[in-house]
Image (tube, rainbow, N blue to C red):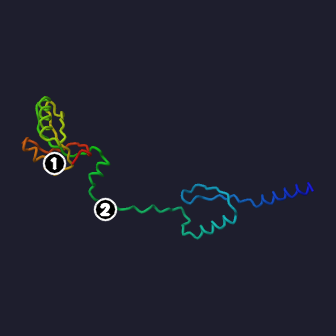
């Protein structure tokens, strides 16, 4: 009886060993890398049948996705600022003075008269100093402020200047 039980167990193990799933090696269809998985032979056949019904070309010539065409248009100020924080724009040159002390006095006087405009001193023309006001994307956007400044400083002009995009009007 004991021998009969051992024989039954061994026979059952060999029977299940034969029923074990088949080892299938497939090629990944997207990148061509090998994808290994274990599956039953019937499942593998069913998958191959489904794959054969797909309308795929057998060669590896994959089409590149079509490009989306965007109409050429002028970028908005926000789009420009995202790409470059500092761009070429315009500032109002209020006056040019001969020394640093006059520049400080004029800048303080300007701040008192025009509180809404940012003023800065440019010392690139030493010994002369430029007093600059505002930051603008275009000459047209500086026109209103220029008109008001010219009432107090008649020599004020709009000049091209590197500006920080977030400060510009």
Picture residue at 80% right of the left edge, 60% below the top: 15
Where is residue 139 drawn, in percent x and y? 16, 49
**Residue 65 horizontal/vertical position (percent):** 44, 61
Left or right, 62 with reference to 36 = left
Q: Which mark is residue 18?
A: none
Q: Is residue 148 above or below residue 39?
A: above
| Position above or below: 114 against 69 | above
The residue at 7%/44% (across/down) is: 151
Relative to 151, 161 lies left or right: right
Residue where numbered disc 1 is placed: 142
Please provide percent x and percent y for residue 75: 28, 55
For mark 1, does the 10 Å Cα neighbourhood hold few (<14), some (14 to 19), or many (20 or more) residues? many
Residue 14 or residue 124, whichever sits in front? 14
Q: CA distance from mark 1 to mark 2?
A: 30 Å
Q: Residue at x 56, y 57 (%)?
A: 32
* Vertical order, 141 against 108 (above or below): below
Give the class, few, some or many, for how many residues have Cα within 10 Å of label 2's Cα (few <14, many ≥20). few
Q: Indicate which label's residue lies in the foreground, 1 or 2.
A: 1
Return the x and y of residue 161 as percentages of the image width and height. Answer: 20, 43
């Amino acid at each position: 009886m004991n021998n009969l039980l051992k024989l039954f167990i061994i026979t059952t193990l060999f029977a299940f060993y034969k029923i074990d799933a088949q080892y299938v090696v497939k090629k990944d269809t997207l990148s061509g890398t090998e994808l290994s998985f274990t599956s039953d032979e019937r499942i593998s056949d069913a998958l191959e049948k489904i794959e054969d019904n797909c309308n795929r070309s057998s060669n590896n010539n994959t089409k590149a996705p079509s490009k989306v065409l965007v109409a050429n248009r002028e970028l908005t100020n926000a789009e420009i600022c995202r790409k470059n924080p500092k761009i070429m724009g315009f500032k109002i040159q209020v006056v040019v003075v001969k020394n640093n002390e006059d520049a400080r006095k004029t800048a303080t006087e300007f701040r008192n008269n025009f509180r809404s405009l940012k003023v800065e001193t440019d010392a690139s023309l030493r010994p002369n100093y430029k007093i600059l006001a505002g930051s603008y994307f275009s000459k047209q956007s500086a026109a209103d402020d220029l008109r008001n400044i010219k009432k107090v400083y008649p020599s004020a002009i709009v000049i091209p200047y590197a500006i920080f995009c977030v400060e510009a009007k």
